[in-house]
Amino acid sequence: MAEQETKEQFIQRLTEENARKPFEEFPKMLYHPDGSSLTVRSRKEQDAKGEEYFESPQEAIDEKAKRDKRDSEKFIAAANAEASEKTGKGKK
């Protein structure tokens, strides 16, 4: 009767098997700041997506935060300019 493999033995065996495999960059997931993701199968396919997609979810989240901050600042500046014009404190 064969001895059943323990969890630790199983993990060790998989680790050793994976260590022998060469790293393959593709396919891989790319992440968009809008929350969507996609899988690309080659560098050419990744390059075709442009700079809108990121290699990690955190990079996409950081980019969204940057964009949101920039958009908020533009909105506030426009609202302040409009308010100044309405109150007569704008430049003439």
Image (spheres, rainbow, N blue to C red):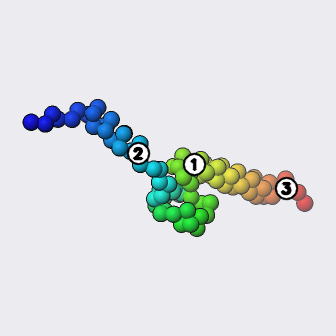
Amino acid type assigned to the residue bearing label 2 in the image: Arg
**In which quadrant will I find the C terminus?**
bottom right
Q: Of all residues shown, which one is farthest toward the left? A: 1
Which of the numbered marks, if any, corresponds to residue 90? 3
Give the spatial CA distance, label 3 vs label 2.
Answer: 69 Å
Observer-nearest residue: 32 or 29?
29
Residue contact between numbered discs 1 and 3, judged by CB atoms under 8 Å = no
Residue 18 percent location from the top left of the image: 38, 45
- Closest to the camera, between mark 1 and mark 2, is 2
Which of the numbered marks, if any, corresponds to residue 22? none
> Mark 1 highlights which residue?
59
Residue contact between numbered discs 1 and 2, judged by CB atoms under 8 Å = no
Residue 22 percent location from the top left of the image: 45, 50
Q: Neighbour class for label 2 at 10 Å: few (<14), some, many (≥20)?
A: few
Q: Is residue 5 visible?
A: yes
Give the spatial CA distance, label 1 vs label 2.
Answer: 30 Å
